[in-house]
Image (cartoon, helix red, strand yellow):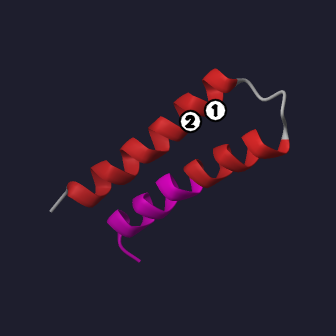
Amino acid sequence: MTLLNTLKLTSAMITIAVVGLAFVSPVFDFGIFLSGFVLGWFLLLLMENKP
């Protein structure tokens, strides 16, 4: 597995974990949820756009 694929997988897992935590725990802070989701999404886009 290349480094690029590893980073893509990691960013996707961050996003899935944050979304899962937000659904499991209703008292999960919305700011943390939103920042984690945006960070994971941004990292995924950044990795997809690199040549």
Q: Which residue appears at 41% of the width and 61% of the height?
A: 8
Judged left or right of residue 5, residue 46 is left
Residue 3 among those drawn in magenta: yes
What is the number of the mark on residue 33? 1
| Position above or below: 9 against 33 | below
Mark 2: amino acid: Gly
Identify the magenta region.
Answer: 1-13
Q: CA distance from mark 2 to mark 1?
A: 5 Å
Asked if labels 1 and 2 touch by Cβ distance under 8 angstroms, the answer is: yes
Name the quadrant of the C terminus: bottom left
- Assess disc 1: are there few (<14), some (14-19) or many (≥20) residues with their C-alpha within 10 Å of its C-alpha: some
Task: For label 2, count other residues whose C-alpha is less than 10 Å away and answer few (under 14), some (14-19) or many (20+).
Answer: some
Residue 41 x %, y %: 43, 46
Q: Is residue 17 left or right of residue 3?
A: right
> Is residue 22 shown above or below 20?
above
The x, y position of residue 9, in whole percent, is 48, 63
The disc at residue 45 is none
Mark sitting on residue 36? 2
Q: Quadrant of residue 28?
A: top right
What is the chief secondary structure element of the magenta stretch?
Answer: helix
Looking at the image, which residue is at 48% across and 53% down?
Answer: 11
Q: Residue at x 44, y 65 (%)?
A: 6
Q: Is residue 5 left or right of residue 29?
A: left
Disc 1 element: helix
Q: Amino acid at mark 1?
A: Phe
